[in-house]
Amino acid sequence: MIDNTVFENKTAAYFTLGCKLNFAETSAIGKVLAEQGVRKTRNGEKADICIINTCSVTELADKKCRQAIRRIGKQHPGAFIVVTGCYAQLKPEEVAHIEGVDLVLGSNQKLDILTHIDNLKKKETGGTIVATRTKDIQTFIPSCSSDDRTRHFLKVQDGCDYYCTYCTIPFARGRSRNGSIQSLVHQAEEVARQGGKEIVLTGVNIGDFGKSTGETFIDLIRALDEVEGIIRYRISSIEPNLITDEAIEFVAASNRFAPHFHIPLQSGSDTVLEMMHRKYDTSLFRHKIEKIRSILPHAFIGVDVIVGTRGETDERFDEAAAFIESLNISQLHVFSYSERPGTQALKIAHSVDPKTKQARSRRLMEISEQKLNAFYEQFIGKRAVVLLEHTRKGKHMHGFTGNYIKVETPYNAGLVNQPCEVMLTGWNYDKSALTCKLLVDVE
């Protein structure tokens, strides 16, 4: 039995590290506490409860999580500190012994926080650990962010069955599972009722949607496309072997699904892809890019790449870089390989030293910058619809076009969360966005 008086006049601060899926789940935790009367802290206010949702995709991510937990403990002295997320699931004992941590919740306990919060009593030594073994995680926990962002992140799927040799995500989040189309449509309708206009579909491996309900990803996006009030959907990262030509054609015909794709490549070398246990080769990946370009020439295509994996010799990296350079894509997201305990990649003989990883990363970032600049410049002088966001930087506000071009305009509170037709006029001062001229509001 939960003692509701524990939460009277309490405040909470929320901290999220890692992916968009984590942001959606943090928001869901916030809703659980808000229903008990817990108020979100204001700027500069000390919190009674701190919720830290962690990431563990690399060793650097683990380090950043440890640093964040210690920093937050100092910023909010006396606060009851709860740590959850992938780092908490993979290394609960390590997290529990970080100074100030009171409760460590595994991936399956995030939304069951009220059951374990234990009257907010601080622990003198070592946090309490509540975590299900990853292999026993079977429940899909729905979540959708609804914080200060204009965009909402709707979790449609969780877990992964792929077990790529470099990755720990299946060990942190369990097997692939998903919500039903009916329940997800209901959540999207609720976002629309609250005034939300853009939804990003998130998950660990969203193209694998349907494992637990017998449905398909194409059926999901068709159903969501019918929800009135949502003017724009974005599909977050989706595996190249799972984004079907049918789905690409559907996006091209849809008025609501944005011409924006985020497709992980990870390596442009077929040999390295095979060592990674990826489920495609460069030929299939090229086909997907060319398919998108053939029917959506203006689409934004972002691509994930990992540099310095075990087995990536100089020759294989050069092969990968040449393949990437040949692709008609918009931007690269470059990650340096990090050794992860328990992964099969550790059995691969050839390792890459840190200095070489840095050099390879710089080379790919230069390719990315060239491609992104070229992509943006082809739209200067063109009209576009921009959904302007709450975010404010100095005297300016920002938003994105359907094809994910970042746009900057003088701040106007009346334009927040409003789709506006603009003329894209040129680069801003630091070439981080395009400037624009407002034309007419679009309903």
Image (cartoon, rainbow, N blue to C red):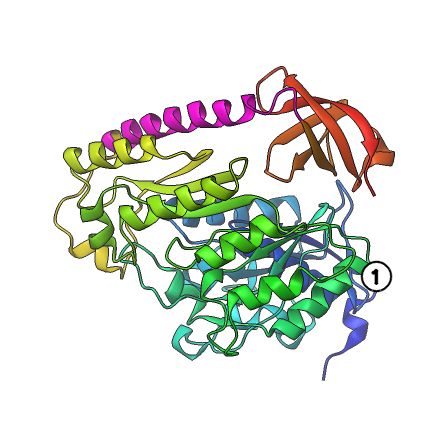
Of the pair 443 and 76, the residue shown nearer to us? 443
* Location of residue 308 in the rendering, given as x and y in whole percent from the top left corner: 25, 39
The quarter of the displayed image where residue 433 is located: top right
Residue 371 covered by magenta stretch: yes
Of the pair 314 and 67, the residue shown nearer to us? 314
Residue displayed at 67% across by 59% down? 225
Of the pair 68 and 58, the residue shown nearer to us? 58
Q: Main secondary structure of the magenta part?
A: helix
Most extreme residue toward the left, as rendered?
Answer: 349
- Location of residue 176 with respect to 263 vertically, above or below: below
In the picture, the quarter occupied by the N terminus is bottom right
The residue wearing badge 1 is 9
The quarter of the displayed image where residue 341 is located: bottom left
Task: Give the magenta part as a residue range.
Answer: 356-382
Residue type, mark 1 in image: Asn
Residue displayed at 60% across by 47% down? 72
* Location of residue 156 in the rendering, given as x and y in whole percent from the top left corner: 57, 65
